[in-house]
Image (tube, rainbow, N blue to C red):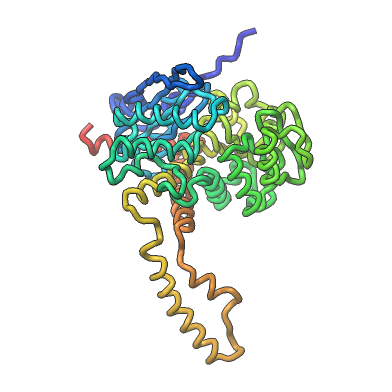
Amino acid sequence: MTAIKEPSFRESVDLMFNRAASLMDLPPGLEEKIRVCNATYTVRFGVRLRGDIHTFTGYRSVHSEHMEPVKGGIRYALAVNQDEVEALAALMTYKCALVETPFGGSKGGLCIDPRQYEEHELEQITRRFAYELAKRDLINPSQNVPAPDMGTGEREMAWISDQYARMNTTDINSRACVTGKPLNAGGIAGRVEATGRGIQYALREFFRHPEDMQKAGLTGKLDGKRVVVQGLGNVGYHAAKFLSEEDGARIVGIIEWDGALCNPDGIDVESVRQWIVKHGGVSDYPDATHSAEGGEVLEAECDILVPAALEGVINLSNAERIKAPLIIEAANGPVTAGADEILRKKGVVIIPDMYANAGGVTVSYFEWVKNLSHIRFGRMQRRQEEARHELIVSELERLDRYLDDAWSMSPNFKAKYLRGADELELVRSGLDDTMRIAYQSMREVWHSRDDVEDLRTAAYIVAIDRVSKSYRAKGL
């Protein structure tokens, strides 16, 4: 029996790029320039731990410098390799172009299992990795700005920021060298949940368009829709939490490394998250049916499938059995190029990763701007907004007294209307606007061209067109 040839993650990205580029009128030289990765730096460094010197291998890849700085996360995982990092950097280029954040694409990774090290050891490793990158300007507020990714978070970003500041003591913008930092280290409200919040906003925008829902065979609103989430990490947890608590969706399946949970009546996401934090997995969780085979739940009946973990989980071996009519890619590359073709032929609508999980880089952009401006959002205008609103409320109250019982303001109107927007509200507003505008740019191509069958191809066309225009403006 001939083994199924599955394209690698990098091959999948290139295949999807080529499919879109073939529908565009680009000079061959410019097409190649956009597609290839500009540079990848491999670093091997030693750290003395537990009495021995341990050598670690890390990468920082720069895919495109059509805009600078370049932007992209740093992940900690044993599976990190050059091909994966370069594919992720390419996705960052297209993602930033699609949502109009003024960055080129980059990505970094360290071959390490962070669970094998104490916190102080991880700090030593992270600071040495940051040193190796920063001294080559692969961490720099104006050239290369990392962020968290799988296996990293606020803590690691704070260490990187501090390490850069120690090396650049006179750089007033040093905090802008990395995003995803804790609030008290120059971070921004709403960054931790940004990618999950972006998934929510993306689905809300999709469900605003009956024509798009019809392509997936769906009707109505998000309320009551059955959702299966694969991976309850930062992104999957926040997406599931917001969709269930704020939009009324039913989380009927949660897939983790040690199996899956099912409950047709809905699963309490917060309860499962706390269980995982305490026990390390979903086994023995009491309020849902546990299945040792997570793959079966990936193929279960549902309305929306949210793969939010690793790349390639939907591939040639299982694509035919996927029953969800709508897939939103919360992870990077969860659907391989081969599976993508099978699903398209089945009529499944896929909201692609480069759009769906762009909430993280969007709010990272806001954080970068905040660090460069040295002022939190809302500080200048919030009270002025409240004062202007006070004028209107005072006039309404005067009318209320004059009209007696004929008219009155709604309860709580005054308190709600008077309150000026704080940083978190402004961040959410900016993210919502970004996700709406980006979706509309994709669907315009999707619906206006007969040769564009899906949202992914439309997203690539929009992104590649914007990158090409940037290069042409530079004289290429």
Image quarter where the C terminus lies is: top left
Total marks placed: 0
- Identify the residue at image location x=58%, y=91%: 404
Q: Which of 393 and 301 is in front in this view?
A: 393
Up the image or down, 298 lies above or below 355; here it is: above
On screen, residue 171 versus residue 250, left or right, reads: left
- Identify the residue at image location x=63%, y=53%: 247
Image quarter where the N terminus lies is: top right
Image x and y of residue 32, in percent: 33, 24
Image x and y of residue 172, in percent: 28, 46
| Residue 110 visible in this rendered orientation of the protein | yes
| Residue 94 visible in this rendered orientation of the protein | no
- Identify the residue at image location x=63%, y=34%: 230
Q: Nearer the viewer, residue 51 or 364?
A: 51
Up the image or down, 420 lies above or below 293; here it is: below
Up the image or down, 293 lies above or below 202; here it is: above
Image x and y of residue 371, in percent: 35, 48
Image x and y of residue 61, in percent: 37, 26
- Identify the residue at image location x=35%, y=29%: 131
Direction left: furthest residue:
475
